[in-house]
Amino acid sequence: MKWRRFAIASGILAFLVLAGWWWQGQVRQGEAWGLVRKALQFQQEWVVTGQARWAFRDMQGRWVERQGRISFSGQTLQVHGQGAELVCHLAGCQVVAKGTAFLRVMPVSVQRLSHVPDRWTLLRRSYRAKLEEAAEVAGRLVQWVRLTPRSQNAFARRLAIEPKTGMVLAQEILDRDGTVLSRWEWTRVEALRRCHFQLPRSRDREQGTRERQMNGFVPVQRLKVRCACCSCGMTMHVIHATDGVADVAVYLPEGTTKEHACPYCRLPQGLSRCTRLGAMTIVVLTRPRPVVVIGDAPPETLLKIAQPFARPHP
Amino acid sequence: MGWLCRLSHRFLPEAAAGVALPLIDWWVRRHVAHCPECARLWRQHERLTFWLQQASAERVAPPDDLWERVASRLASRGLFAPQPSRQMAIIPSWQKAMAVAALGLVALGVWLWWRGAPSSPPTITVAPPDAFVTAVLHQHIAVTAPSPFNNPTFTAGMIVGGEAR
């Protein structure tokens, strides 16, 4: 009889311990999601400027570290890195880059697709959140949160979120085996600017079934841009998709290969290829139709996204 | 008697009957070859198995109408005569159902594992970006500008970092 009572008491105790452990896990996950939501809202509203340090693995797997200053005036973004400079006018997706190459691209049409879930819904659907250690970044107390993708189509991320404001002060993108591919960190926050990048929502219905789902990425905007550097007048269709955190854009150039001074008009030729800059992956398919897919996702995901676009239309 | 001997005694009947797993069978035979005590037990077991087989071969088979005669006598006394064939049929069907369920579970597990396993990466040449790709990469900053976790500063910083090399 004694043994029976002991067994029942042990069972109840084990159940209580398990329930407590599960409950604690749920509470911590809720806290993690709360922080991610706060970070999402902050990043949608504000753009941070100041001193930053970024590091990434190059194609040979070497770890490259750089420091620079990022300033923002109106809608012009300036990045001054060690020996390099980049100036972007981001109004209406117009970009004028002065780095190693000069580029001027003008938007012809910009559509923010309707009938797509918002980022928060996509994020909850695509990732799992987990609270990690607390640390200090740029003199501020932050909480690291790990976002693990539910599928193999994306990379995992670690976000250093300031609990008070929701500001993301550091970000790491990790490979499937846990290797850090890219790291971004603010070393000094100088100012906060209102973010004006929200594009007007189009009333047009989505076109084509193949744009609806691209390996877990959902298209959110469609653009048509034109080269304004030279007289070639080459246009490019862009489909921008996201899984809530990572972004992927499909670039479909329309035109013929021309040798102008502008690099934008030199369509890719030769073999299909892949380039990596940390987690930023660029897949180029040349035949039968040139397609460039850029995103912070594994190369095989981008290749799967690119292949249907490279096929000629029926 | 060491623990190895105790372990070999556990598997000895299976190995002697030739139904043990190949690895266990190999290990037991190897142990018996080195241990005189276990070898003696092995020989005893072999003799016993031989006698049992001989005895079963010499056993007289019952007449074919034995069960019918027993059943008719039980019925004449008013006793219920169970149908052994039906009872026997239930047990195998249970076992079959369990085996099918277990196989189904294994198949489900294999399917889930196969579904979750990363597919082999497609072959594509790794190459440095050309002028066109660099230009499109710059444009990517503007395209992903509304993305909260790909703040334009992040993408631009990466590109500048790459160019600075």
Image: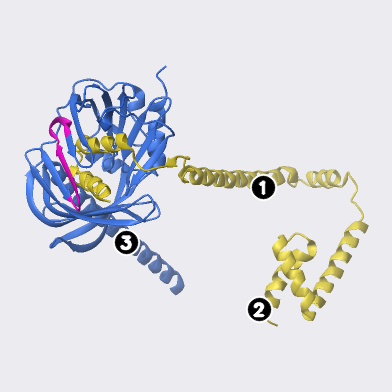
Where, by quadrant of the figure, is residue A21 drawn?
Answer: bottom left
Q: Which mark is residue B3?
A: 2
Q: Estimate the spatial distance between the alpha carbons at disc 1 and disc 2, rounded to whole Å.
A: 38 Å
In this rendering, would B114 be left or right of B149? right
**Colour in which the image shows chain B:** yellow
| SS at mark 1 in the image | helix
Give the chain of mark 2. B
Which three-letter amino acid code belongs to the residue tagged 3? Trp
Q: Which mark is residue A21?
A: 3
Give the residue drawn at x 68%, y 77%.
B4
Residues drawn in magenta: A81-95
Give the chain of mark 3. A
Q: Please provide percent x and percent y for residue A55.
A: 27, 55
Same chain under badges 3 and 2? The reply is: no
| SS at mark 3 in the image | helix
Residue at the disc numbered 1: B91
**A61 is higher (above) or lower (below) than B83:** below
Q: Which chain is blue?
A: A
Which three-letter amino acid code belongs to the residue tagged 2? Trp
Q: Estimate the spatial distance between the alpha carbons at disc 3 and disc 2, rounded to whole Å.
A: 40 Å
Give the residue drawn at x 41%, y 21%.
A312
**Quick one: quadrant of the N terminus of chain A?**
bottom left
Q: Please provide percent x and percent y for residue B138.
A: 23, 38
Which three-letter amino acid code belongs to the residue tagged 1? Ile
